Image: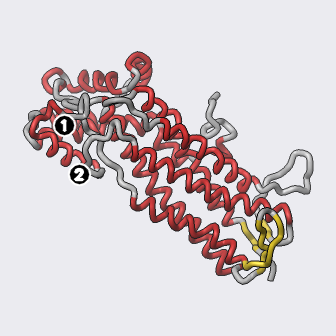
Amino acid sequence: MTTSPFDHPFLSGLLGDAEIAAYFSAEADIRAMLSFEAALARAEAMHGVIPAEAARTIGDICANFAADVDSLKAATAKDGVVIPGLVRQIRQAVGSEAGEHVHFGATSQDAIDTSLMLRLKSVTFLFGGRLHSIVTGLAGLERQFGANRLMGYTRMQAAIPISAADRIAAWRIPLETYRDRLTEQTFPIQLGGAAGTLEKLGPAAASVRASLAQELGLTEEPQWQSRRMHIADLANLYSLITGSLGKFGQDIALLAEAGGEIELAGGGASSAMAHKQNPVAAETLVALARFNPTQLSAIHHSLVHEQERSGAAWTLEWLVLPQMVMATAASLRLARELAGNIRRLGTG
């Protein structure tokens, strides 16, 4: 039993996305946090903060470490975050000699936020590929049907005839913009220590952070643990993507309602009316386009990180951001399918 439609036993058939959901699994999160801990140790050893032998031991253990997830669950209930419990497990596996150097100078937020950036970077690459596929599909429809006529509507009333190319361009052009914006996104390392000052690393702090960022393939940037603009920017882009795909879905649903100007394959069946082919994908795109903006409001509330760190605002992000990612994933998947199911658009 689940309370989320994105991984529900049957609703996930419509709203789920196994490829993207994998990046939000406990296993993926733990792997990314272990990568952070191993890379941190290597960066600190490189700049003389911890012994090189300790870094090698930590790296070897993290590469093959299997966390006790049940224990992490209990620890998170007590600590509010997973890292204290995870670090205890790693230190026990590393042994007392090198164990004191595990997570040295870092704080829970460093590991958790860096894990998020690593995973969102991969997700964003996949989203860019899906947008490219949709844009390519729409461009193909424009070549095939662009010269056909459609009735143009303004304020839900018939206006003047337009070409199918006019309507398709309104769907395609925003998606090209979002595809380009996804490629411009940066994913910064988070390393600030207890209060963002990296006080335990002393004069090596900036060098350690730069080396850590380079090893993990992230952007080097001063700590941002209480400055959440990167999260808000990404969430806003997700909402824009689903919004424009919702416009595509709404237009297709209206065309299907009127009939005559579109032929669709792959419609959904009705339990009461055997003759119907419901535009399920189009309707779902509209629902997802309305879902993400409501979540975006919560992300903007989570910008209020009081002082050097906020437990409340951070927890709000955990509740909301994965849902927005999954909604965007479902929207991109459904839009790609819907574009591929258009057999005719407009009249010759």
In the visual, does 7 lie left or right of 233? right
Kind of residue sitting beneath label 1: Ala
The image quadrant of residue 93 is: top left
- Which of labels 1 and 2 is toward the front? 2
Name the residue: 27% across, 30% down: 107
Vertical arrangement, residue 51 with respect to residue 293, above or below:
above
Q: Position of residue 204 (x, y in %)?
A: 11, 40
Q: Position of residue 218 (x, y in %)?
A: 30, 50
Element type where label 1 sits in the image: helix
Neighbourhood count class around disc 2 (C-alpha, 10 Å): few under 14, some 14–19, many 20 upward = some
Question: Which residue shows up at 76% across the image and 73% down it?
Answer: 345
Name the residue carrying label 2. 214
Residue 20 placement (x, y as % from top left)? 51, 47
Q: Answer few, some or many: residues within 10 Å of disc 1's Cα (few below 14, many 20 plus, some between 14 and 19).
A: many
On screen, 236 above or below 49? Answer: below
Q: Does residue 5 appear left or right of residue 298 in this picture?
A: right
Identify the residue shown where x is 27% and y is 40%: 223
What residue does disc 1 label?
Answer: 41
Type of amino acid at the residue the image marks with label 2: Gln
| Quarter placement of the N terminus | top right
The residue lying at 38 percent from left, 34 percent from top is 30
Asked if residue 145 lies left or right of residue 237, the reply is right
Front-lying residue, 236 or 328? 236
Q: Position of residue 297 (x, y in %)?
A: 55, 40
